[in-house]
Image (spheres, rainbow, N blue to C red):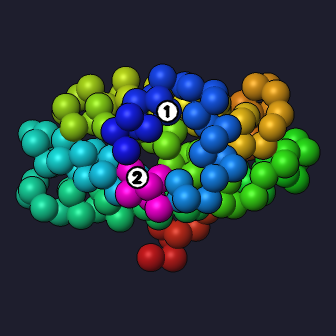
Amino acid sequence: MLQNAIRAARLDVDFYNTVENDETYTKQAGLLVAIVGALVGLGNAFSPLTDGFFGPIFWGIGGALLGWVVWSFVTDFVGRTFFGGESDLGQMLRVLGYAQAPLALSIVPFVGWIGSIWALVAAVVAIREGHDFTTGKAIGTVLVGWLIYLILAGLAYALF
């Protein structure tokens, strides 16, 4: 799994195409998301800006898994509906799960922003390969998708 995460972080197009089409990678992608979420939470737990230790780890894992599913759904919908992509939810779950690998850098407090930018670039590659369209359409999917994602997050926050 570590080798797969490294290939994803290296933006290996062949790897993303393999993952896109092989359903056996779905569980591994989910496990990677949970591990990365734990690392993000651990980095937050060691930050002087955070109180507690286990809470940030718990919320890191839960938030990563929920965010992964919602983001995969949104990018699948946006890519197919607005940009003519050829994907399904399973394919988006797999490619976007692996695209989160660079977020592991978040274990180091105040360095996570580097992993976030890297993961954003990986997400564009993942979406492009998952939908089988151009980089421009992948960037458009990310931009439109983020607007929808933020609206959904705002609604969830208002309701809960």
> Amino acid type of disc 1?
Ala
Which quadrant holds residue 152?
bottom right
Viewer can see residue 12? yes
Tag 1 secondary structure = helix
Labels 1 and 2: the sequence-earlier one? 1
Tag 2 secondary structure = helix
* Residue lying at 37% horizontally and 23% vertically, measured from the top left: 114
Q: Which residues are magenta?
A: 27-32
Viewer can see residue 149? no
Q: Position of residue 50 (x, y in %)?
A: 14, 48
Residue 30 in magenta stretch? yes
* Residue lying at 21% horizontally and 37% vertically, measured from the top left: 107
* Residue lying at 51% horizontally and 76% vertically, measured from the top left: 159
Q: Is residue 20 above or below residue 117?
A: below
Counting other residues with Cα less than 10 Å from the Cα at mark 2, is it few (<14), some (14-19), or many (20 or more)?
A: many
Question: What residue would you read off at disc 1?
Answer: 8
Question: What residue would you read off at disc 2?
Answer: 33
